[in-house]
Image (cartoon, grey):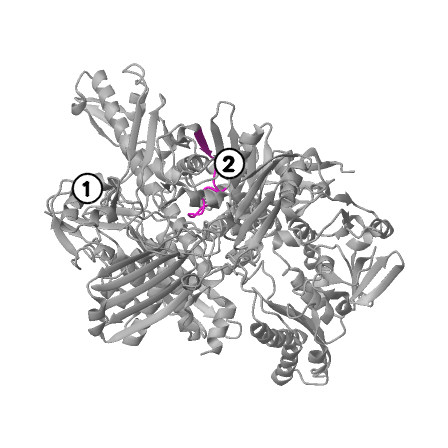
Amino acid sequence: MQWFDYAAPRSVAEAVSLLDGRPDARILAGGTDLLVQIRSRRRTCGLVVDGKRIPELNELSFDPAAGLTLGAAVPCYRIYGDRAVRSAYPSLAEVAGLIGGTAIQGRASIGGNLCNSAPSADAVPLLIALGAQCRLAGPGGGRTVAVEQFCTAPGRNLLGAGELLVSLRIPAPAPGFAAHYLRFIPRNEMDIAVAGAGVSLRIQDGVIREARVALASVAPVPLFARAAGEALAGKTPGPEAFHQAAEAARAAASPITDMRGTVEYRRHLCAVLTRRALEAAAREVH
Amino acid sequence: MQSKVHVRTAINGEPAEFLCEPRQSLLECLRDLCNLTGTKEGCNDGNCGACTVEMDGRIVTSCLVLGVEAEGAQIGTVEGLARGTELHPLQKAFLENAALQCGICTPGFLVAAKALLEQEPEPSEARIRLWLANNLCRCTGYDKIIRAVQQAAREMKEARP
Amino acid sequence: MTKTEYQVVGTRPVRHDGADKVTGRALYGADFQMAGLLHGAILRSPHAHARIVRIDTAKALAYPGVKAVVTAADFPPAPDKLVDFGEGATPLAYVRGNVLASGKVLYRGHAVAGVAATSAHIAEEAAQLIEVEYEPLPCVLTAPEAMQPDAPILHDGLRTAELGEKAQGRSNISEHFRHILGDSKKGFAETDVVIEREFSTATVHQGYIEPHNATALWNNDGRVHIWCSTQGSFVVRDATACVLDIAQSRIRVTPMEIGGGFGGKIPVYLEPVAALLSRKTGRPVKILMTRKDVFEGTGPTPGSYIRVKIGATSDGKLVAAEAYLAYEAGAYPGAMVGPGGMCVFAAYDIPNVTIDGFDVVVNKPSTAAYRAPGATNAAFATETVIDELAEQLGIDPVEIRLRNAAKEGTRRADGPKFKRIGCVEVLEAVRGSEHYQSPLEGPNRGRGVAVGFWFNVGLPSSCTINVNADGTVNLVEGSTDIGGTRTSVAMQAAEVLGIPVEDVHPSVVDTDSVGFTAVTGGSRVTFSTGMAACEAAGDVIRQMKERAAKLWETVPDKVEAGRGSFRCNGHSATFKELAAKVGETGGPVVGRATVNPRGVGGSFSAAIADVEVDPETGKTTVLRFTSIQDAGKAIHPSYVEGQMQGGSVQGIGWGLNEEYYMSRDGMMMNSSLLDYRMPTSLDLPMIETIIVEVPNPGHPFGVRGVGEANIVPPPAALANAIYRAAGVRMRRLPMSPPAVMEAIWSK
Amino acid sequence: MAVVFIPTLLRPLSGGVDRVEASGQSVRDVIENLESLYPGMRDRLMDGGRLRPNVSVAVDGEVCPMGALEPVGPASEIHFVTAISGG
């Protein structure tokens, strides 16, 4: 492993100043992706900036009006261990329990999952479905972007020089709202999604008012399948509507063939998983 | 300038310190700097669980923790399970159930299972399997490991006042 | 026959090395520490096939902290000879070429150079600074492709051998064998149903959790001391001596605890490199493989292409069979296709058989043994064809197997007749099991069965037993203990001596301290080393009788011994009492034995698998699984069960998800434990076991080795279960979700 | 006399005969006698007085550790088989 230096800043400002002008600096949260990548020489790194001692990156707080603030370095076990999260965002608690295994969840964070920007990131389709926003900090101050805009290519995102993800903000769930993420893996744990589907529904008076669908592992980035969600708006939840959304998801997918699956198989899974996730979300509303 | 870092931590309840390179993992620091070789390396990327240790009350794969991150932390390893000459109920159950063959994964399983039973004294078989899915064993097919954890859970329950 | 009553054999004591292994005190190879230790790293080829034009080590040597670099140029000139370390004879040049590539690299991950430095990080960084200029060559990755006349040739000097005769012309086929029994053509003419199918299986890895490791010290007296995790310390000694062209007596190998092997920790990889680096530096050098090194640079088990044709009469009698097996040896010959050919129809009494086998080199890692090497691939083919025959003939799949089961006196296709075997008993246990008797209900579910065989081996073992004055004994053996064999060997000694197993203290010692002992492999330790322990214990008893005779002023022949006591003319003494008097009756008592036993009892194993297949994803869930195996006599039933469960789960992994996923240019794309999907605890049910005991007449307690046969049936049993669940016949391993889905689509 | 089973690949040397009687006290003797019956057989099975690498001999169904030196009984069945190892 190449040599790197280590810094553990205590504030966002200190972190930004450490990152600024150091293109070889990397933010460390759980390290479950970063350290593997440095060790296997997939990423170079001269300075590891440990974000875990920065209060804002460790924040986990829920406000019934404003929603959830999820610090970028909050490890998965804190997310599914949090009563408010489990009650207001059961799908988020569940996805936190999908990332890696128990020991990985002791370290890995949802923020890290997003910043790693893998197309297969399990948390990201759900974050998109939940309508989450990213709060970034950088030398030029802060900015907020929608999660679906964050990833730009495999392993790449729109974080600029000196910029870091501070936290995610997830809107408070409206009445009749439910979300669900399903992925397909050959094993039952410790695996990378062959495909994944994160969905959300807001059902009012028996009609879908709003829906969002996002997909994992079927595009260069976690994919916001806008058309699949829009196909559901105004429809009655049920097999017909879900089938249409599933087909829209299949059409939106542009996967590749690799060791995890073929193009055809992944497109097929998109439809299956989207339908199953919608069914699960609809069950949750009722 | 490349310089090592002085880390003060606590391992198995005892204060400990070591001087490490920032790139050294907690696993390397435990094994090579603290002579605690009970924690094993199987994959060095978090997928086998042989290096599982407890860190501030949570289990982590120590290959994916930097030694420098242990500053101020409480670390628990397999060497800390037994109390003097008295084995931990899990250690006894692993032996009585023949839950190890080659034994290389055993430290990781023991540390992980201990954390589970401390958190959930009566886990179901499915829960044990889920919790331990981060730990690979290639010898046993897991059957006897699961049974050992179940036995230890029963015995720990009976031993409680 | 009356059942023999044993005191120790058949009980379940806690293993002697147990406390060390649950407290973290047991020292495995990577745990070895020594003053002045240097750390090594290996540079590996990025190409699957390339000529090495130039290696420049200057930058690596100049890197701060680097102490030495070695390449194949550091080997002494290679004598042209064949060497055999218990896994088949092979030219020394091949063994050496696999340790460090010379002239050409033959697979991605092929070791090219070794570096020693003051830390592992520095060694690894420095390895990247070695400049190697390659001239890439076209590569070939599967047996059928490599057998084509225009295929890229791996070894210019390789000629196809057919039992002592070499063919003309270059080829990637290193060996062809053929077995003919009866006349299969004539046989097929007499059948009512014939089924012929093609199969392929992917390269899979043993997947032991502990990566390979070696520490070597080339001492100032010219002796080399090696500490490593190996299945065979004497193999490491002899192979390292050959590779380095030094006398084997100059090498001492201390086997550290070993974290799994399954056949993969028999070849040497790091030991000669560590020794060379130590010679150059004058310091001990430790090298540890990374997981990627293990996948890319050690020996997985062969991928294969197989055709099987079986014909039966309408009443389910198998009359004729043919098999064609082409196994991928990887970069160097030795795909274990021979055993595959001997096992492919071993479970059946078929009068007319033709078997052709081909050992084919390809640009993948040089394969090594893996639990019943060669048999699992073959059984996948045979056992799914048998299942189809049963279906077509309307016969229960266990019944058709029983009607044709091999038994004592059945002539095998390779010639000899079977001795006492337990195939029928194993199949009867399947049929009688609660699992097979209970219905499987629910949609998308199916049950499959399969049977498998492995010969097991004997090979030499040595053992000494030293009697202590307190009545305990110290047992010294050379079999590295991978799964509790210290105890299964000690139990046999205890039984013969008539003392509690806790009073036997087994030690696995270095190659200077015990007689030659072959590898821990071939399911041989409890059989062969156990037999050595029995004989050494018998030697102790003989000497103790002499001592008793002295005490009681009689002749040894008059002293009776049994169940731990000695009696004569009204005198009696326990083993313990007599042990206290060995000093005054002539000095220490040391029993010794070396064996190279015949009478190896082969083992049959069967599997019953219940699965559910998700028709929308192709994913198979194992609902229930039972492993049935003939152990001859289970010395330690828990460890027999453990072997059955472990082998079954490796077979399940092989069947469902494990594979070397190769790019076209020969790169393994999934060289991590994340993407090489071995089963986790969450992927499995409890693995039920039924131990069948058909005693092996060739062993004092009837032992048959149980380490291997259990891996053979699972892939076929799963394939047969998947067929009943999803209606698709899977003929390719792994039967991963995309593969099953595709089969469902093309239904 | 012992019965020697001619390995399939050597049957061209025996004109297709698959078993033959041959006398001898040891496997080596038997092979020498086989050679006089079917010239060329010896070199396919032995090399310098020992069995060829990867050739094992089974006498009466048991693979014999002593190879060419193995004693042979008057009514023994002799097979030349692939050497087996294991995992």
Residue sitting farthest toward the top? C584
The local secondary structure at tag 2 comes to loop
Q: Can you see residue C710?
A: yes
Q: Nearer the viewer, residue B154 or B81?
A: B81
Q: Residues within 10 Å of mark 1 (few under 14, many from 20)?
A: many
The span picked out in magenta is C251-269
Three-letter code for the amino acid on which mark 2 is drawn? Ala
Task: Quickly name the residue at label 1.
Answer: D28
* Residue located at (45% from left, 75% from top): C443
Residue C99 within the magenta-colored segment of the rendering: no
Quadrant of the image for the C terminus of chain C? bottom left
Chain identifier of the residue bearing label 1 in the image: D
Relative to residue C356, is residue A225 depicted above or below? below
Question: In the image, residue C500 lies at what x, y percent?
Answer: 34, 33
The x and y percentages for residue A41 are 66, 51
Residue C558 in the image: above or below residue C695: above
A207 or A8, which lies in front? A8
Q: Which mark is residue C26?
A: 2
Could you tell whether A11 is left or right of D72 in the image? right
Based on the displayed image, in which of its 4 quarters is residue C447 positioned? bottom left
Disc 1 marks a residue whose amino acid type is Arg
Q: Chain of mark 2?
A: C
Please name which of the two marks, 2 or 1, marks the residue nearer to the observer: 1
Is residue C262 in the magenta section? yes
Marks 2 and 1 close (CB-CB < 8 Å)? no
Q: Main secondary structure of the magenta part?
A: loop
Is residue C627 visible to the viewer in this orientation of the structure? no
In this rendering, do the residues under marks 2 and 1 share a single chain? no
Q: Position of residue C367 (x, y in %)?
A: 44, 51
Circle 1: element type = helix
